[in-house]
Image (spheres, rainbow, N blue to C red):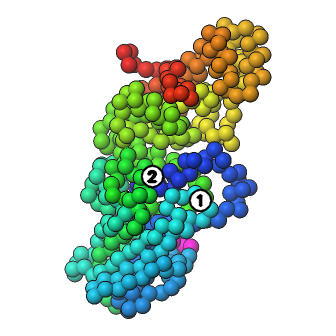
Amino acid sequence: MPQQFSFHQASEAISIASTLATRPTAEEKATLRRGWTTGACATAATKAAFALLVKGQAPDPVEITLPKGETPAFALGMEERGVDWAKVGIIKDAGDDPDVTHGAMVISKVRFAEAGDGVLFRAGKGVGVITKAGLPLPPGEPAINPVPRQMMVRVIQEEAARLAVSADVEIEISVPTGEALAAKTWNPRLGIVGGLSILGTTGVVHPFSCAAWIHSIHRGIDVARANGFERVAGSTGSTSEAAAQAFYQLSDIAMIDMGDFAGGMLKYLRYHPVPKVVVAGGFAKLCKLAQGFLDLHSGCSQVDFDWLASREIGLGGTPELSERVRNANTAAEVLQLCLAANVAIADEVAALSRETALGVLRGAPIEVETMIVDRGGNIIARAGQADGE
């Protein structure tokens, strides 16, 4: 069963896609300012809207308690009251994280429901609706993550008890710009249509969070499995993704945005297997995987040119070529040198990267293929493909 902590953390994760190349060091991260999740903003807006509905006045700022006990206060971005409803908006502050939802207005509209209904959730403008299986909530439900739901239920129950009123309410969460923002996330691939997901497990956005990206990978696998896909493909970037998708004519749902986190994808697949998996990437990235690295980011792993030289010699290369490989500036230069000398270094790297992947999977019932794609989008090496594929 999928873990019940996030739909996919996609809004947070996709927004750091273009910045992973400059992932900050631990020292740099220590100076970055944290922010608040859409779930925390929705909870604060709900608490304020409920007070506005009952008392005619909303607290500003409004304070909430997060799952780990932190008590941030949120300034109100807007408030409005009707005959039988009230709504409050809070502008999301993602801190120093390059989050696609930073600056978006998260609005909660609250009205009383029928006695015995409890707390009901609705998707307003810019909040998505789930249309595919494999996520923590069933199709047809608003894409409001379980933890934010729990947080909102708790503040309603606490405030209702304090104000001596009914806790049967309907909460409609909206993000006016959400539909446009969702196009920059992975929601469409996961079958979440119409807008964003309301996310968060702790309420806190940690700048450049790798965990958010890896959670997104997990949710992508969950959805692919739940929808019966026999083959998925994880890629290190858009060029290799396009090549793998076109080669196998794969649905968007079968495409896993692995990025640099090969280990994050493979370790999850070990316990949540899909019959066939393609790991696609450029030559340099798969060199690192072939060397045994599972985080392919330049801050965590480097191409070993001495290692490449030893592989080239083993493939019948010359000492002169080996020396040029050792002194090459980039992996791309090594590839060109070997291609010119008719040394099949790409095939070797594809085979060895597949061995690394199989080692991580530890015998899971998965057919693994690795695919190396050049900068022009051409597939130049494959390993582990089934006969005829």
* Crowd tier of the residue under label 1, counting other residues whose Cα lies within 10 Å: few below 14, some 14–19, many 20 or above: many
Asked if residue 374 can be seen in this view, the reply is: yes
Q: Quadrant of residue 297?
A: top right
Question: Who's the residue at 47% across and 34% down the image?
Answer: 241
> Reading the chain from its start, which is encountered first: label 2 or label 1?
1
**Is 69 contained in the magenta span?**
yes
- Magenta stretch: dominant secondary structure: loop
Q: Amino acid at mark 2?
A: Thr
In this picture, is 147 found above or below 4?
below
Q: Which mark is residue 117?
A: none
Secondary structure at badge 1 equals: loop
- 63 lies left or right of 230: right
Q: Quadrant of residue 364?
A: top left
Which residues lie in the magenta part? 66-70
Residue linked to disc 1: 97
In this picture, is 239 found above or below 93?
above
Question: Who's the residue at 47% across and 45% down the image?
Answer: 217
Secondary structure at badge 2 equals: loop
**Is 291 contained in the magenta span?**
no
Percent position of residue 94, x then y: 56, 64
Residue linked to disc 2: 185
